[in-house]
Amino acid sequence: RSAVSFGPAAPLCCLRCRRRGAALLPPLERPVEEVQQQPRRSSRRRPSAAGRSACSGWSSSATMREAWRRRLVHVVAMAAFLGPRPALAQRAFKISSSTCTIAADSSSCQISAAGDAALQVEFAAGAPTTLTLDMSSATTCSASAVDCPQVFMTKSDHNANVLKISKCSYFKQTAYSTHLLRYTFINVGDQFPYTIKDDNDEGRGVVPPGAVRECYCYCPNTCAVGTSNRLYCTHIAAR
């Protein structure tokens, strides 16, 4: 290996020494050969170890976020596909096509067709009137052809009108002392309320116009006896 002079008084050295020495000299005093042999460096600075570590952490974090995002999208898609359908979960009651008109105290009410679970009742006597429906009777709640009314859509024409549910623990001519049966009372009128009663002949709730009452029937035993059946009603739901 040939020696290269670095100036008038510079010593001779090997190529390795020359490179080390050249790095210590000012830029203007470096030999032409050394300047020509140096590769062109990029103007960008290499990130420090801390910077490389931070970038690596950011990349890892971004990858994890992307993985969780894809998993969340997958879960939401599966829930939407396998979740309950609104039409299947909604409770629906078929409204009777005809209206049961009450002009005097009555113990029966026509039911238009099989499948009617919401019964339309209209008090039209203009005086205190009572409609008593015996849920153990085949004419009110048949075991085969006609469904038992569960919702009563009532229009009242007097403050003292009464809708009485007798033997409320019966459903399709079978007593259910092991279950609670629910009945819903709606006042679709505009002016007068009506009262809900059971076999104890006590008012269990008053339904003003535009309101809804829900009642639960409980019979601990001997449900064939009317007074063993009792309605427990919720508070008034304002219009």
Image (spheres, grey):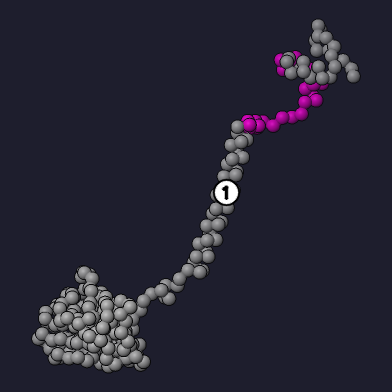
For the record, the magenta segment spans 26-49
68, 23: nearer the viewer: 68
Q: Position of residue 35 (x, y in %)?
A: 77, 22
Quarter of the rendering occupied by the N terminus: top right
Q: Position of residue 230 (x, y in %)?
A: 22, 78
217, 27: nearer the viewer: 217
Classed neighbour count for the residue bearing mark 1: other residues with Cα under 10 Å, few (<14), some (14–19), many (≥20): few
13, 191: nearer the viewer: 191
Q: Position of residue 184 (x, y in %)?
A: 26, 77
- Relative placement, left or right, of 88 versus 27 is left
**Image point (23%, 74%), residue name:** 232
**Image point (79%, 24%), residue name:** 36
Q: Quadrant of residue 196?
A: bottom left
Badge 1 amino acid: Met
Q: Does residue 131 appear in the picture of this structure?
A: yes
Quarter of the rendering occupied by the C terminus: bottom left
What number of labels is visible? Answer: 1
**Image point (73%, 14%), residue name:** 25
Q: Quadrant of residue 60?
A: top right
* Residue sitting farthest toward the left: 127
147, 178: nearer the viewer: 178
In the image, residue 82 lies in the stretch drawn in magenta: no
**Image point (32%, 91%), residue name:** 142
Q: Quadrant of residue 2?
A: top right
Q: Does residue 209 appear in the picture of this structure?
A: no
Task: Classify mark 1: helix, strand or loop.
Answer: helix
Q: Position of residue 170 (x, y in %)?
A: 29, 85
Q: Which residue is mark 1?
A: 64
In the image, residue 47 lies in the stretch drawn in magenta: yes
